[in-house]
Image (spheres, helix red, strand yellow):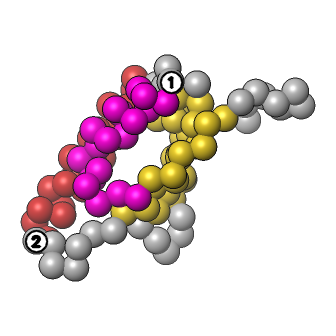
Amino acid sequence: MEFLVNIRITWPEAMDPGLKAAVSEEERGRAAELAASGHLVRMWRVPGRTENWGLWRAADPTELHTVISGLPVWPWMDVTVHALAAHPVDPGPAV
């Protein structure tokens, strides 16, 4: 299944800068692993915000939840998920 996922990150104002840097670095590494495994297909940044939209793949919503809730930034994330279905006039993937 494919899912369009919006992730908004809200870092605590009093968060230790070293912890934030470490969590951010760990997040980038985990995202690379998820891309390599085919779960994270595409990712777009929302300019000027700590927010992104991504195209994700998982066997079902439960697997997607397991994948996303395992992200290092999970405690500071607000996530919205939209399950996607095939459309009869879909021209196919962009090249």
In the displayed structure, does residue 74 sit left or right of residue 86? left
**Which image quarter: residue 15?**
bottom left
Q: What residue range appears in magenta?
A: 61-78
- The first of marks 2 and 1 along the sequence is 2
In the displayed structure, does residue 47 sit left or right of residue 25? right
As drawn, the residue found furthest toward the top would be 59
Q: Residues within 10 Å of mark 2 (few under 14, many from 20)?
A: few
User: Disc 1 marks which amino acid?
Assistant: Asp
Q: CA distance from mark 2 to mark 1?
A: 36 Å
User: Disc 2 marks which amino acid?
Assistant: Asp
The residue tagged with tag 1: helix, strand or loop? Answer: loop
Residue in the picture at 23% in, 47% down: 72
As drawn, the residue found furthest toward the right would be 89
Question: Is the magenta region chiefly helix, strand or loop?
Answer: helix
The circle on residue 60 is 1
The residue tagged with tag 2: helix, strand or loop? Answer: loop
On the image, the x and y values in percent for residue 85 come to 71, 30
Residue in the picture at 35% in, 33% down: 67
Q: Dot 2 corresponds to which residue?
A: 16
